[in-house]
Image (cartoon, rainbow, N blue to C red):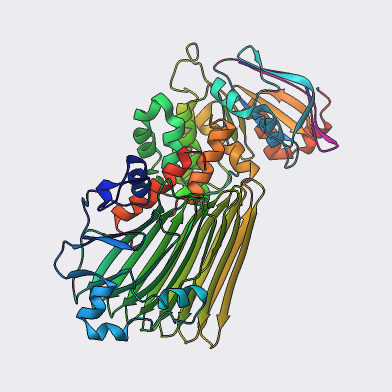
Amino acid sequence: MPEDIEQMADLSTTDRDRLTQTGLEVDMKNRSGSFFQVDQEIKQVAALEKGIEVLSIHEALAKYDWLNEYSWKLVKKDKDQYTRYVADQPDPRGFVIIARKGSKTVFPLQTCLFLAKTPVQHVHNIIIAEEGAELHLISGCASASYTKTGSHIGVSEFYVGKDARITSTMIHNWGDEISVFPRSAARIEENGIFLSNYVCMQPVRKIQMSPFAELAGKNSIARFSSIVVCTPGSYMDLGSIVRLSAEGATAELLTRAITTGGTIISRGMIEGATRHTKGHIECRGLILKDGTIHAIPEIKGDVVDTELSHEAAVGKIARDEIEYLMSRGLDEDVATATIIRGFLDVKIAGLPESLQNQIDAAIDSAEKSGF
Amino acid sequence: MLDIEDLHVKIGEREVLHDINLHIKEGETHVLMGPNGSGKTTLLRALMGFAGLDVTSGSIVFKGRDVTRMPIHERAKLGMGLLFQRPPTIAGLKLGKLLAVTSGDRVGMVSEYTRYLHMDNFMDRAINLGFSGGEIKRSEVLQLMVQQPDFVMLDEPESGVDLENISLIGNAIARLLEKDVHIVNRKKSGLVITHTGYILDYLDADFGHVMCDGVFRCHGNPREILRVIKTSGYKECLACQKI
């Protein structure tokens, strides 16, 4: 059995590597703060930059009465069995991050939820960027190398204030018998920007999520990007829903999905509820070995002057692309790998370089192991 | 350098190239002309070894080795290179990344070639995505300069290219074919498909061939052939009984 883990550095080399793959800096270098929870035990809560506050949710609710106005307001307690499960916990776990008015973090703040022994890990997180604040989060979620089964249920509520920006990059590294049920929602005020990035290149038994964003303020922006590889035995039901509720609001949902034998359901829904709004869904899927990619892009316009579009393509790598690269001297395997790497190479506008590098590194690592 | 003997090629059930014989020596540049759909591109694709074409008989010998059944990349490694008329778009794959993968020990030359072809701003662009006609051809030539093939096949290098770019591309192809090297010492060979002949202003081609309906109808001086085609069209070639 493993030793008790008090901090990230206490993890075995294997598990530290697993966390590093999710973009976490075990030594906290170039990070503005950190939250580390193993199973249901909070091990580390640290804010290293002025204007940023990181608290356990328990502590935060005790400290700030006003937080009750934010808790369980975007995600309803009775949404489904998973939210009910988290809401019913007498002693909630998870974190609250507050980026105070006008604060801008240079470095990302990292949160790590590590599943080691407990059968179910549950968290409730609230993330608030006040007016003009800028907050970059990287959430590494992983299970220990020796943890074979378990579930992770995470409720997250994001509040992006006026002129504020939150980027949330989540890189998952679970085991092949772990089930994951994130339940997230975001509200974005005037000129606010919310970027949500999800990367999962490793096996997982089941992941099911469909984060929701309400673009409530004028000229607010939401962009969801998902980059996933689904291995045999994995089932990924991923989607995002955006409601364009204010003039000038724009949303983009982008997915790059590869199956090597698993099942991917890629959902996307944008609702144009107000005039002068724009939304686009792009889903591209590559089936490398027999598996399923089921793209379900939905767009719903309720008024004139909302501009919504979607494109979805699922298939194999085109033969002419492979032969093109072969004619430059690459053998078929290298040509194929080069095209796959390009397919997954998504540059996310507005994401700090360090986080883009983390995403690239997660993909590179999967590429080296041959997906 | 290249010896094609009695080559027959089928696409599906239909034979599209019949009894092709062609010999290209080291340092020579040959021009291939012919009406649309006559089989010129198919010949280059068969030489490179693409799928969908079935060589039913005959042989392709390159540098003394029979490459008729050799995989594409091995032909490329042996020194064959192709400038595509319409290359595919590869979403996500950056031109710079591809050059990094293909350059090998010529990695030091990539930036010079890139500057020469004014492609500095294209290194982070997905290959051919949103490229104009001229940009596609500059990207193709750049990839070949990095590849440095000994035998260069060029499928309509001037199509879709404006006059300014033709000069740039023409000079770059001349460099590829070592036109600056004295003919005695020239090692690089080429086979160029052209409709307009504009590219010949830069290449000094040695031999011309006319292909119609999958067979060669004429061999001769490329300038002379082009002059006849420009004045009388291909009907002259079809009527000609010289071969």
The image quarter containing residue B15 is top right
Where is residue B191 shown, x and y percent of the image? 61, 27
Q: Out of B241 and B28, give the one closest to the viewer.
A: B28
* The magenta segment: B8-26
Q: Out of A274 and A178, give the one closest to the viewer.
A: A178
In the rendered view, does A44 fall on the left or right side of A155?
left
Residue B202 in the image: above or below residue B160: above
| Main SS class of the magenta portion in the image | strand
Q: Out of A150 and B72, give the one closest to the viewer.
A: A150
Q: Residue furthest front?
A: A1
In the rendered view, does A42 fall on the left or right side of B156?
left
Residue A195 in the image: above or below residue A189: above
Residue A178 in the image: above or below residue B50: below
Where is residue B3 shown, x and y percent of the image? 68, 16
Residue B199 in the image: above or below residue A270: above
The mark tally for this picture is: 0
Q: Does residue B34 appear in the picture of this structure?
A: yes
Q: Out of B202 and B20, give the one closest to the viewer.
A: B20
The image quarter containing residue A55 is bottom left
Q: Residue at x 72, y 42 (%)?
A: B36
Q: Does residue B151 appear in the picture of this structure?
A: no
Q: Quadrant of the N terminus of chain A?
A: top left
Magenta stretch contains residue A370? no
Where is residue B73 shown, x and y percent of the image? 58, 28
Q: Residue furthest right?
A: B13
Where is residue A219 shown, x and y percent of the image? 36, 80
Q: Residue at x 53, y 21 (%)?
A: B150
Magenta stretch contains residue B23? yes
